[in-house]
Every structure is written in structure tokens, then in C-alpha cells.
Amino acid sequence: MGDRLAGKVAVVTGGGGGIGAATAELFVNEGALVAIVDPVADAVAGAAARIDPSGAKLLSIVRDIGQEAEAERAIKETVSRFGQLDILVTAAGVRLYGPITEATAESWN
């Protein structure tokens, strides 16, 4: 465990798995308080149990940050719990069906 992020608070979207969960784990191991945000409740619960079983350094938030109001709620919950926000990692993935070069603004949204 390090302390490079001691005293910092991070929100990690897509924190239920993959790059988001790995980032959240690294941040906790470096001393940060972290909120993981993901729309899949089971993924959030699993990542939280693995990263910080005590729940002292991690806040689990089930929200779809693709919806502006849900993203705002996730930020407010984080600040309410930890008192500040220093770092935002947007690791939530999007699904595009087809080549990215053919994506339209409509399909992206």
C-alpha cells in the first residue's frame, strides 16, 4: 500500500469491472477514498467486496451515468459521504454496434 493519493477522493465510473474496477483498487491501495459507479448492482457489490471488504474507503453507487441526473446524483452522494471530490475517472464503456468510424451522434448518445 502506498500513500500517493492520501487525502484524495475519487469517483470512478465503470467501477464494477474491467479498467474501472482495477483503477478503483489501485486508488484505494494508494490511500484514496473512492466511489465506484456502475449501473449493474451485482458488479458494484462484487468489486466493492474485493477492493475494500470493510467499506471504509469505498462507496458503492448503482447509477447509470449515461443519464445526466444520475451522474449528478452520484457526484452529490460522493461529496456527501467523503466531503470533497478531487479525481474523476470516466471508465464507463459504451456499446456501439458496428465500426466506430461509422458511429453517428445519435448512436453514440
Image: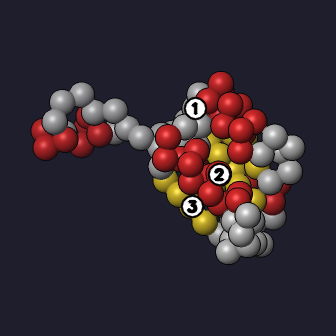
Residue 25 is marked as 2
User: Residue 108: which disc?
Assistant: none
Which residue corresponds to mark 1?
39
Identity of the residue drawn at 86% across and 43% down: 54
Please indicate whether residue 42 sits to the left or right of residue 94 in the image.
Answer: right
- Which of the numbered marks, if any, corresponds to residue 88? 3
Q: Position of residue 73 (x, y in %)?
A: 67, 46
Front label number (2 vs 1): 2
Whole-angstrom CA distance, mark 3 to mark 1, is 17 Å
Q: Amino acid at mark 2?
A: Glu
Q: Earlier in the sequence, mark 2 or mark 1?
A: 2
Where disc 1 sits, the SS reads loop
In the rendered view of the protein, which quadrant contains the N terminus?
bottom right
Q: Residues within 10 Å of mark 3 (few under 14, many from 20)?
A: some
Tell me: 94 left or right of 22.
Answer: left
What percent of the width, then of the height, locates residue 49?
75, 36
Q: Position of residue 52 (x, y in %)?
A: 77, 45
Residue lying at the far top in this picture: please name it. Answer: 42
Observer-nearest residue: 38 or 19?
A: 19
Query: Separation of disc 2 and disc 1 at Cα?
Result: 18 Å
Say what amino acid the circle numbered 1 marks: Pro
> Residue drawn 67% across and 74% down?
4
Disc 3 is placed on an element classified as strand
Which amino acid, by three-letter code, is at mark 3? Leu
Circle 2 SS class:
helix
Can you tell which quarter of the image residue 47 is in?
A: top right
